[in-house]
Image (spheres, helix red, strand yellow):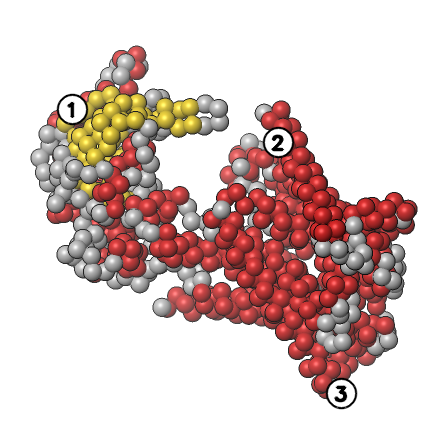
């Protein structure tokens, strides 16, 4: 029951003290049903704002956002959105199990949306077996983020929105988590939209990378990633991967790249 | 930026003036409308008259309360700073004595005042001692926080630059601790006035506390109100000046 | 869990040092008094203890009234402060006025209100109860106001994305995240209520620790003065301890916060 995401000519203006900031200017993008898409851009380009428009946390100044055939509001009220925040955003007084089951408390335990997986299976899936009764502050950052992912999956979302979900983690944990996330995503078959500021992460994870520029925030290029699925870490050494990385980089830096030092082969680290 | 601050200050003064105006008006209307007898709630005008008539008496008493509070605060600040510095210099000393200090911290003014009366008799010295003691703990706690709060990285940076101990204190520790001193002074300031008035009350020595008590017992309602209002205004002034000073110094924290 | 025994051992270790300090202090006081090194107005600990043994009634007859006046005032203030804080958060326009009203009430030296209230209400216990309430309202108001705003933006967005109703947001997010702040306020308020009740008793009361204190002070009954001081501290510390105990049970996720004073 996955749905697509359609963003059409969306503009967003924030009114600050006496001055208005154009956060998004005529942004359009489409994520097909079941696809994994990434949005990448410098800080302040409005990528998180875009994600929040899809999640109905904010309303667009102009333009239209649809999730499937519905407005974001209807999609949200139908509980078909999963949102993973930057930083786990767990409730510190709830145990791991209770945090994962928070959506059930809101929607009702008998909800039709409830995942066919039990909470125990989800805990297992994100690799936290035995931590059911732990409180968030007893977990590492990576473990907390896994709880947040399990929480986003307990209601089988049609659309999974990820706002730099692993931004606070170290590189090594981050790659592991990305692999796990892809595995979970492939199993659930939902549409996923990831916001990130890591070029390699964007390319590695998605079918399509939307590159944004800042002030005003707009999409400057869309890079298709032809790498096969399931993704494996060794694919990051392939020419296809580098090609995509370079194209994303071109979109991000434009002419700056030519002005700078002679172009060399990209280094593998990011 | 500066003009905006001036603007908000003017706005704030205006708000306060408006609040006071509405209060006085409501007070007058209420007294008139419900025909409240003067001995229960006097009219604003009669209180103002009592204030004018007893101006020198009230000012004299207020002066005692204020000097007790100011002297006590000064002594307390010196003592608290000395203890906080020695705590930050010697961990063992801190571990041994801090719990005892914390036990005394929870001692209410109502317990301190009679003991001090026993020790120092029924004069202004008791008030000063009581203020010193009640003001001591908020000052100490905040100063300790300020001394401990200096950013480790900033201290290390200075160390890398080869700064001397004195330079470290001057460049990092003091600037960090100063705003905390004012936080402590703000909290201590309001308790200081209260402490001074409480001890005047229990010792019967000159001051606003005694004036209020006497006026209450003599059923001089107008004078009572004038004295109460004076004490509230004094307390509010102390609160506002210390918070303003604190906010100015704490600007970098936000 | 095995880890649980470590902190309890540590509490023990931090406990014995001040305990030893306290015992040494008491013993030293006793010895010094017996040696005649202390001024006459400092009784030995045993003299104060003797007061209780001599007439236990003076303790029970005064401790009880003060305790219940302080408790009643405390709960009245709690109910009003928490409701007012809740309203301030719900109705934004009222936030400033409610807070400023709290500050103003707090800045009024409580003893200034006692003679006024005595004029209106007589010298019955109601004056002391009201003053106890006045003396302790502010930290509870601040705790409520700060606590109900403690949930961060992301947590609110989470509830929004889940389409939680207002009641659900209140129940699942706002109240639990407010709890540590509420208790921080409740804890500070407990000794203040005791202080309020006792000070009000100074202004005139038939019984209570404050009345006992004033009477002893005027009749130069030194041991009794010290006894009443001891009872005051006991009540204040007891109130604080009780609230801290409830906090331990309620805020079990061990989240320590500090109120902006």
**Left or right: residue C1 compared with residue A122:** right
> Which quadrant of the structure image shows residue C127?
bottom right
Name the disc covering residue C54, or none: 3
Sort mark 1 into few (<14), some (14-19) or many (20+) by Cα contacts within 10 Å: some
Q: Nearer the viewer, residue B55 or A202?
A: B55
Do the residues bearing badges 2 and 1 touch, measured as CB atoms within 8 Å? no
Q: Is residue B11 left or right of residue A215?
A: right
Label drawn at residue B8: 2
Between A255 and C35, the one lying in front of the other is A255
Chain name for mark 1: A
Residue A70 coordinates in the image, percent (x, y): 19, 38
In this rendering, does residue C32 appear at all? no
Percent x, y of residue A108: 25, 58
* Left or right: B36 in relation to C141: right
Q: Position of residue B67 (x, y in %)?
A: 83, 49
Residue C75 in view of the camera: yes
Crowd rating for badge 2 (residues with CA inside 10 Å; few <14, some 14–19, many 20+): few
């Amino acid at each position: 029951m996955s749905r697509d995401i359609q963003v059409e000519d969306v503009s967003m203006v924030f009114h600050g003290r006496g001055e208005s900031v154009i956060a998004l200017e005529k942004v359009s993008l489409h994520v097909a049903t079941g696809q994994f898409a990434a949005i990448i851009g410098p800080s302040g380009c409005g990528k998180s704002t875009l994600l929040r428009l899809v999640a109905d946390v904010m309303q667009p100044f102009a333009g239209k956002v649809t999730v499937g055939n519905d407005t974001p509001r209807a999609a949200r009220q139908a509980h078909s959105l999963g949102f993973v925040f930057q930083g786990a955003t767990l409730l510190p007084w709830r145990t791991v199990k209770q945090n994962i089951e928070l959506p059930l408390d809101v929607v009702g335990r008998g909800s039709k949306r409830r995942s066919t997986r039990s909470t125990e299976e989800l805990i297992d899936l994100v690799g936290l077996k035995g931590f059911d009764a732990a409180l968030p502050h007893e977990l590492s950052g990576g473990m907390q983020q896994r709880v947040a992912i399990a929480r986003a999956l307990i209601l089988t979302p049609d659309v999974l929105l990820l706002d730099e979900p692993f931004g606070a983690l170290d590189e090594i944990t981050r790659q592991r988590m990305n692999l796990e996330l892809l595995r979970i995503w492939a199993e659930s078959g939902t549409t996923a939209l990831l916001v990130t500021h890591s070029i390699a992460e964007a390319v590695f994870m998605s079918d399509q990378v939307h590159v944004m520029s800042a002030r005003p925030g707009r999409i400057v290029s869309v890079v298709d990633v032809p790498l096969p699925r399931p993704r494996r870490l060794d694919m990051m050494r392939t020419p296809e991967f580098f090609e995509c990385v370079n194209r994303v980089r071109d979109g991000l830096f434009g002419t700056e790249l030519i002005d700078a030092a002679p172009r060399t082969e990209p280094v593998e680290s990011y | 930026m500066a003009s905006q601050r001036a603007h908000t200050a003017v706005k704030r003064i205006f708000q306060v003036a408006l609040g006071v105006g509405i209060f006085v008006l409501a007070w007058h209307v209420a007294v008139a409308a419900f025909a409240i007898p003067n001995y229960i709630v006097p009219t604003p005008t009669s209180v103002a008259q009592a204030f004018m008539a007893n101006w020198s008496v009230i000012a004299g008493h207020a002066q005692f309360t204020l000097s007790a509070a100011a002297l006590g605060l000064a002594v307390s600040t010196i003592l608290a700073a000395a203890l906080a510095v020695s705590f930050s210099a010697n961990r063992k000393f801190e571990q041994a004595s801090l719990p005892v200090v914390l036990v005394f911290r929870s001692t209410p003014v109502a317990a301190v005042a009679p003991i001090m009366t026993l020790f120092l008799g029924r004069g202004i010295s008791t008030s000063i001692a009581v203020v010193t003691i009640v003001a001591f703990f908020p000052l100490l706690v905040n100063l300790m926080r300020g001394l401990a709060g200096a950013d480790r990285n900033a201290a290390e940076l200075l160390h890398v630059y080869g700064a001397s101990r004195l330079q470290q204190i001057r460049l990092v520790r003091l600037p960090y601790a100063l705003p905390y001193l004012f936080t402590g002074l703000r909290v201590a300031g309001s308790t200081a006035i209260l402490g001074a008035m409480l001890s005047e009350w229990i010792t019967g020595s000159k001051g606003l506390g005694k004036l209020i008590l006497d006026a209450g017992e003599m059923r001089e309602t107008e004078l009572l109100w004038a004295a109460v209002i004076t004490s509230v205004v004094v307390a509010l002034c102390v609160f506002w000046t210390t918070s303003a000073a604190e906010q100015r110094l704490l600007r970098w924290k936000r | 869990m095995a880890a649980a025994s470590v902190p309890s051992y540590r509490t023990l270790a931090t406990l014995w040092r001040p305990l030893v300090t306290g015992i040494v202090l008491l013993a030293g006081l006793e010895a010094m008094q017996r040696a005649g090194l202390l001024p006459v107005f400092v009784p030995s600990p045993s003299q104060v203890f003797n007061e209780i043994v001599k007439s236990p009634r003076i303790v029970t007859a005064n401790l009880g009234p003060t305790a219940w006046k302080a408790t009643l005032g405390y709960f009245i203030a709690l109910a009003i402060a928490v409701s007012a804080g809740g309203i301030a958060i719900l109705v934004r326009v009222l936030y400033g006025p409610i807070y400023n009203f709290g500050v103003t009430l707090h800045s009024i030296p409580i003893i200034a209100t006692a003679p006024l209230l005595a004029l209106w209400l007589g010298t019955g216990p109601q004056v002391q109860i009201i003053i106890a309430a006045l003396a302790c309202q502010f930290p509870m108001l601040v705790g409520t106001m700060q606590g109900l705003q403690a949930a961060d933006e992301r947590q609110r967005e989470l509830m929004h994305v889940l389409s939680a109703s207002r009641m659900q947001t209140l129940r699942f997010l706002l109240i639990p995240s407010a709890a540590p702040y509420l208790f921080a306020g409740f804890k500070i308020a407990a000794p203040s209520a005791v202080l309020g009740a006792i000070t009000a008793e100074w202004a005139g009361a038939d019984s209570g620790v404050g009345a006992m204190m004033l009477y002893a002070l005027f009749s130069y009954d030194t041991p009794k003065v010290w006894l009443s001081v001891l009872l005051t501290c006991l009540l204040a510390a007891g109130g604080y301890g009780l609230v801290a105990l409830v906090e331990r049970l309620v805020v079990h996720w061990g989240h320590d916060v500090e109120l902006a004073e």
